[in-house]
Amino acid sequence: MTTQSDSPRDFWTGAREISPLAVGVAIYGLAFGLLAVQASFDALQVGVMGGIVFAGGSQIVAVQRIVAGAGAVAAVVAAVALNLRLLLVTASIRDVYAGRPFWQVALGAHVTTDENWALMLVERAKGRNVGYWYLVGGGVCLWLTWCLATVMGVVFASAIPDPKALGMDFAFTAAFIAIARSLWKGRSDLLPWLAAALVVAASIRLFGIEPSWALILGGVAGAGMAGATRRG
């Protein structure tokens, strides 16, 4: 077993090597910022939200729920449910956090995303001894990119009299599709995705549950199925 590197210099290596992926993050960050304006978010609110939440899919779902009039509580719970998968992501690399002080664990967990997690695993598979600082470097790069792009999206949208007239109301859907596509890792994701989709559809069609809560149930079901299949 290769011992992971613990050099802070790996921070800059991780940031540099994830920069091509940061371009994609910037694109759907702009889309999120453009449409967050429709929920009456200003640049400061979007920047703070991105800095604290830092989860594209969850932020999109939360703002969509607010636009739909579901209320703040339902929006927050739906966003949290969608992000339950990150518990599995961070658990899969618990060796990275082992023995570290709390602030490092908290920082690493906050900036862990699908992109820098996957990049680190790919590099490890190639035989490189990358670890905590490589992961955090990539994560901080993506975090800064996301926050800047979302704020720029708000600034740009604020200068447009009617974003819907330009078809920008579709940007939420397009951005969410792009994020969902980036989360697909292969056949191992099929059962969790199907479980989530079926629970959401059944909740709405058969039981008449409000879509916000149906999304929450679907997120929990998908996370549960992922945990069960990967333990197996």
Image (tube, rainbow, N blue to C red):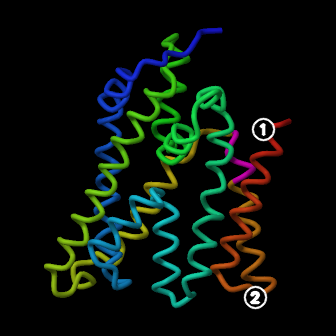
Is 232 located above or below residue 209 in the figure?
above
Residue 31 rendering spot, x and y as whole percentages: 32, 65
Q: Main secondary structure of the magenta part?
A: helix
Which residue is the extreme one toward the bottom?
69
Q: Is residue 75 magenta?
A: no
Please rate how many residues cluster around mark 2, counting C-alpha atoms within 10 Å: few if below 14, some from 14 to 19, many from 20: few
Which residue is nearer to you in this view: 228 or 197? 228
- Quarter occupied by the C terminus: top right
- Region of the chain picked out in magenta, as a range: 188-192
Q: Which mark is residue 106?
A: none
Residue 9 rendering spot, x and y as whole percentages: 35, 20
- Is residue 97 shown left or right of residue 35? right
List the residue tagged with mark 2. Answer: 208
Residue 171 rendering spot, x and y as whole percentages: 35, 69
Q: Which mark is residue 230?
A: 1
Disc 2, SS: loop
Closer to the observer: label 1 or label 2? 1
